[in-house]
Image (tube, helix red, strand yellow):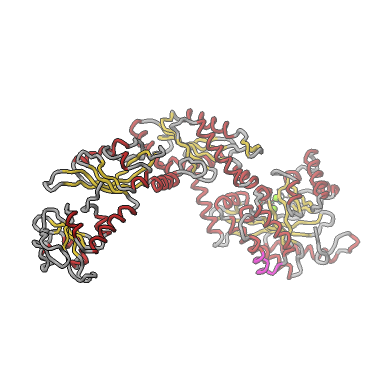
Amino acid sequence: MGLDGSTLRAVEDEVPSACILLDARGRITNCNQAALQVLGKEGDAVIGKPLAKLLPELDLTSTNGPGMEAGKAIGPATNERWCIRPQDSASGGREVVSDGNTNDQFATMPDRQVLDADKRFEDFVELAADWFWETDADLRYNYLSAQYQKATGLSPESRLGYRRGEFRLNGPDDGEWDSHIADLKAYRPFRDFRFAYLDATGERRIALMSGRPIFDEAGTFAGYRGVGRDITEEFNTQKQLEFLAHHDSLTGLPNRVTLKDRLEHILAIARRSGTGVAVLSVDLDDFKLVNDTLGHAAGDTVLCEGARRMTSVLREMDTVARVGGDEFTIVQANSEGWESARASASRLIAHLTETIDVGGQKVHCGASIGISLYPDDGASVDELLRHADLALYKAKASGRNSFCFFVPEMNEEASKRRLLENQLNEAQHDNSLFLEYQPQVEIETGRVVGLEALVRWMRPGHGLVSPGAFIPVAERSGLILDIDRWVLRRACAQAKAWSDAGLFSGRIAINLSAVLLSRAGIVDEIRAILEATDLSPERLEIEITESVLLIHTDSVAATLSALNEMGVCLTLDDFGTGYSSLTYLRRLPVKKVKIDQSFIRNVDKDSDDAVIARAIVSLGHSLGLCIVAEGVEHRDQWKFLRDEGCDHAQGYHFARPLSTGDCENYLRQATDNALTMPSSSGVVNLAARCWHY
Ligand code: C2E
Ligand code: MG
Ligand code: MG
């Protein structure tokens, strides 16, 4: 195996001497970088130009230049290669050397520079990461550089005499052989042809090959030569990246991008074949609860198990994609309409509601599903996905573990919701939000101990909207963050003003949404508002619902502790309507519990409600909590609660939620009454006593 000196361009550029390839008429057909430097030209400007014109002092027809052996004529034969040493090189002369099939002459040259070039050439071949190869006219290897063995573990000898195609491994990572063979048959050069093969250990690997045809002096095809490179690692990394770009890394399911592509494709087929397509939007119920209470690792297990169950109950041809945290989308081609979609949805829910074992813990995680059907519910990818989502919204609203088909009215509801959101967004700037204050009294004395700030919205064109109607919308859209911040600032400032006027020394209670309380930095925000309004933290009460306790992440627990340490009073609102777990109460720094008004409504008539209210008062007291009854409308309810030892009450019996002006009058009256009443009546001057719970 000898090296042919007239080999590759890569080598040409590697050698320091100028290399120029001339045709029979002495015109330049190719040259390397060093030659361009010698010629003082750039790029392709020299191609096709006679070398004699560019270098007139160079006599190409005879031996010339110092250092050449006398009598050895090396005129420009066809495809002969010349090396020219630049003027400013060590020996100062300009030399012309032919290496085209003239290794003898090359060898007889006494010039060190040329010998160095030859040595460098060999070093280059040896050190290059690529291997060099050459075939005969029958495309059988007749040369493979040593690097081939280093890269593949296969000895060059084991390949010599064989064609490359004899070792190829068919497969998806193998290149386009048909067009490659066509190139070879037409003696065309090829670049970066991918080729799968087995290495010495039997592992499937990928090589990239480039080559160009060789012709002998008579112009007859003599074979190919080129470079090869093992790209298995980069290929796998690339494939991995491509996979990640199209799949969810946790479950391995297609992601939203792939889902849309597939749905597009499936719809194109459905349009041609007149078949149906079902799109199912699936949301795992209570996933957030699992994630927040048991941690992210448990959440990941639930998602993977959910994904596995969905895939296992569907047909292989159905696509299951993960499109968000706990949201999945299923596309069923060839759907037979709503009956089959309904059967799939029932099967999915049945499997997803079965308990999941998470490290020994049994977790229940059901699912809600929204369904849209092609062609009835939409013709485009976006329309079908949007309509399945609207149906899902409805399914979730109607309770857990249910599915719902899209109906056109949902579009109308959605646009109403969007309008409401837009107007609510405006409300913060156009002063249509305002606060009312509802007094809280001490049951025993009737003394005002606090005020609950309740937000109101005068919606343009609709009149007064209750918070029950817009707070859930604000929570879903995130607008609640700004609304609650606004309420905090406004209510704290108002409490301070009434306090300065000597009208109020109790606590101002504010309902804060779980969304805001789970934000990082909320403690600092509240501290800053208290400082800005100059209200002491002891005068602030924050009402939270059990949903906050369900997001029992470490950060929420830390927020509640920090607020408690600041002196802010934490109250659990609407107790009895949610999980009503007294265990939460023991773990968290809650000081007050408000019995939900649904238990108070019939507390004087219904024995069950009376038992519940009595139990909450007594259990709460045993935990050292202050108990408040909300929704007290009648004297009999008040009497019952007083007899049971309930501490505070709030409700129409004492006062309705009042506008700022009405509340101010109410406070003024309450203060006057307290001041004029003799202390023996049991009514205490509220301004004079400080309350601790
Ligand atoms: P909540 O915190 O439980 O507030 C008590 C609700 O009961 C208020 O309804 C109040 O007007 C009503 N109420 C008070 N006394 C009586 C009574 O004797 N009988 C009856 N039937 N109802 C009474 P409202 O103002 O409609 O507020 C509803 C809910 O909206 C509040 O329940 C609270 O959870 C939420 N909310 C109100 N303001 C805000 C706010 O600024 N931010 C947040 N995040 N939520 C708020
Ligand atoms: Mg409240
Ligand atoms: Mg309440």
Q: Residue at x 50, y 51 (%)?
A: 419
Residue 192 coordinates in the image, percent (x, y): 30, 47
Quarter of the figure that contains the C terminus: bottom right
Which quadrant of the view contains residue 107? Answer: bottom left
What range of the chain is rendered magenta? Answer: 527-535
The answer to whether residue 298 is left or right of residue 344 is right
Which residue shows up at 18% across the image and 64% down it? 84
Does residue 281 sit above or below 29 in this rendering? above
Nearer to us in this view, 610 or 282: 282
Residue 106: x and y in percent read 19, 57
Tell me which corner region of the image, top left, top right, bottom left or bottom right, holds residue 373: top left
Taking the image as shown, residue 239 lies to the left or right of residue 208, namely: right
The image position of residue 127, as x and y in percent, is 34, 54
Chief secondary structure of the magenta portion: helix
**Quadrant of residue 156 in the image?**
top left
> Residue 624's x, y, as percent?
81, 52
Q: Residue at x 19, y 68 (%)?
A: 40
